[in-house]
Every structure is written in structure tokens, then in C-alpha cells.
Amino acid sequence: MASKPQVSGVTAKIIPLAIPKGAKKLCELCQKPAHLQCSKCRVTFYCDTEHQQADWVGIHERICQLLVPIRSPASFHPLQADREIHHSQKQLQQEQLVEISRTVAQSKLAEGKHQEALPAAQFSLRCAMDVYGSSAVQLVPAYLLLAEANVGLGSLAQAGECLSHAEWAVLKSPDCGQAVRQQLHRNLGRLYTTTGNLEAALLNFANDVYYASEEYGLDSTVTCGGYFLMANVFVKQGKMLIAHSLYSEVAHTWHSYLTKLFEIQTQNVQNSTVSLESSFDEAQRAEVDQMLRTMLEVGENDSSQDTAQTALVTHCLAMLCFLGGDPQKALEFGSRALQASQLIPNHDLTEPIQGLLQLVQTGQHPGTDAS
């Protein structure tokens, strides 16, 4: 029996694969000839223990048993109606697997775990091909996940190939939704930023903003993500005035959104009926935190940054930390926001900042009883 590597606190068992004569099994990750078999589902195969471990951590642990009805030989159904029912059920199961693997890949990318995201993104793509065909527009989300993972790993050629497939699928689908087009252009912009083609990056981020505004509105937090990425490019080009103007749009959009969340949470602090998780998940919180800290850092390194912008961004960070259950950081950023706002006579943020600091200092935060 082969070794049993410990993965995520669970023994991911594998067994040597006895391949019947004439049969051919391929590795789940690399599609090379397989020599090992998952002992739990017995329908998934690997070339070595390293790929088995990577797949287990990346996605297989979540879908191991769900693969059994998909990959096991189908029972014979003599009636056409029964065959159609079986086919429909299998397709629904495959669609479920596409969604699960896509969600897992997104979560891992949000955590910066690009290597772990690859198996989930690869599986999502293969499963989507089985359901929709090899050139359908429904494959685009999986291609974008693969591209983002590869950019994070520095595998830019692979990322470019994935984005080419995604772009071709979109071009062949004139009825493709605005949200998919927006995601495509955002990923293209990120790739061009990484490769140093800043003009192409700006063009794609401009398209990102256009499609996002069509789908979600000009004041959407999705749309302002494109503004943020454009601003980062302008910083690279040394065009700080334009960059700060775009950062200001981002800061005001997030300030408005976080203020609404803050009001909901504090109004229900004793008997919370709306949780942060229901409207603003951990991946989003981490992304916004990174955006706000970037804007704050750029502002601190540039004398043209005005005090009002600093107050706005630090107030956003204070609310974000408060909503995320980190009172120490909320106090730190809230104090910085108050200091900045008090340098501006009659600044309209001073009172809200003081209110937040009072809540933090009295130990009130979402999910606690203020009594």
C-alpha cells in the first residue's frame, strides 16, 4: 500500500491502481498516465502522490463522493424516458460540481492561495466542457479563474492562453452578459499591468468600468474596482493627479457602502438581525481592506494627497475593522481619521468618526450585547 499523506487534518488515502489490460486512466491534474487511485471514491486517478495531495487540498476533498454517480458506469435503461431522466439528473449533478469548484477557486484566490486554486479552476473548466461543450461562453468564468491563478503564480503565458480562450468564447457570443464581459476585461487589464503594457491595461480597465456600470450602476462597488485598478496604472505612469481623482471616487463609493452597513449593524447591536456575513463576506472584506490600505499608502508617499482624502480612507478602514470584529484596528484607524478630520474646520466626518470611536471604546461591536 502506498503512503498516506496527511492533508488538512484528514488522511487522504490512495491505493496502487491495477489497470485492466487495454484500459487507460489519466491523472486528474496533468492528464498523464495514472498509477494511483483515490480509495474513497475510486473514480479519480493520479500519476503520483504529489498530484493527489494537491488535488485533495485544492478541490477533491469537497467533491470526492459527488464524483461517484458522475463517473461510475451508467446502469442500462431500456426505456427512452428513463434514459432521458438519467441524463437530466447527471447534467444537474455536473452543473452543481461546476458551481462548487468555481466557488472554491474564488475563495482560494481571495485568500491569495493561487497554487491551491488551480485544481478547483481546472476541474470547473473540465466539468463545464462536459456540460456545455468545448467552446461555450459558460466556460469563460473557469478560464478567468485559471488566468487569475496563473497571474498570481507568475505563469503569464498560461494566463494569456486562458484569457485568449475566454475572449474568443465571448466574441462568438453576441448575447453574452455584461458581467462576463466586465470580468474578462478586468482580467485582461491585470495581465497587461503585470507584463508592463500599461496602455493596453488602461484600455481594458476602461472597458471593465463601462460594462460594470451597465450591469451594476455607476455607484456600484464593482464598478469602483475598475477605477481602483486604473488608478494603480496611473501611479505606475507617475500621473498622480489622475490617480488621486480615481482613488477619491473609490473612497467615496466604499465610504457610502460601509456607512450603510455600519448603520445597520449598530442599530441591531443588541439584537442583531443582519449579520456582516450575509451582506459582505470575508473575501470581499479582504479585498476592500487591501484597496483602502493601498490608497492610504500611496497618499502618505505623495505630498499632493489632501487631508480630507486621508480622513475618508482611514474612516473607511475603521468601519471595516469594526464590522470585521477587530476593535483594536478600528480604534487605530478611527483615531487617525479623527486627527485628520479635525485639521479641517467644520468637517462633516468628525461627528461620525467620534461616534464610531465611542462604540469601540465602550466595547460595543456587531454581535455583542451592549447592555
Image: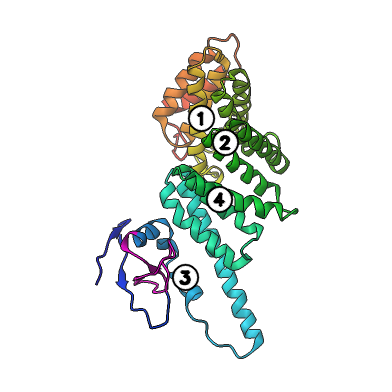
The three-letter amino acid code for the residue at tag 3 is: Leu
Tell me if residue 362 can be seen: no
For marks 3 and 2, the one nearer the N-term is 3
Q: Is residue 40 above or below residue 362?
A: below
The three-letter amino acid code for the residue at tag 4 is: Glu
Q: Are marks 3 and 2 in contact (CB under 8 Å)?
A: no
Residue 258, position as x, y percentages in the image: 57, 33
Residue 210: mark: none
Q: Is residue 11 above or below residue 83?
A: above
Circle 2 — which element? helix
Tell me if residue 205 can be seen: yes
For marks 3 and 1, the one nearer the N-term is 3
The three-letter amino acid code for the residue at tag 1 is: Met
In this figure, which residue is indicated by the disc labeled 3?
Answer: 67
Label 2 environment density (alpha carbons within 10 Å; few <14, some 14–19, many ≥20)? many
Label 3 environment density (alpha carbons within 10 Å; few <14, some 14–19, many ≥20)? some
Circle 1 — which element? helix
For marks 3 and 4, the one nearer the N-term is 3
- Answer left or right for 52 relative to 286: left
Circle 4 — which element? helix
Q: Is residue 53 above or below residue 39?
A: above
Residue 261: mark: 2
Question: Does residue 26 belong to the magenta stretch?
Answer: yes
For marks 2 and 1, the one nearer the N-term is 2
In this figure, which residue is indicated by the disc labeled 1?
Answer: 319
Circle 3 — which element? helix
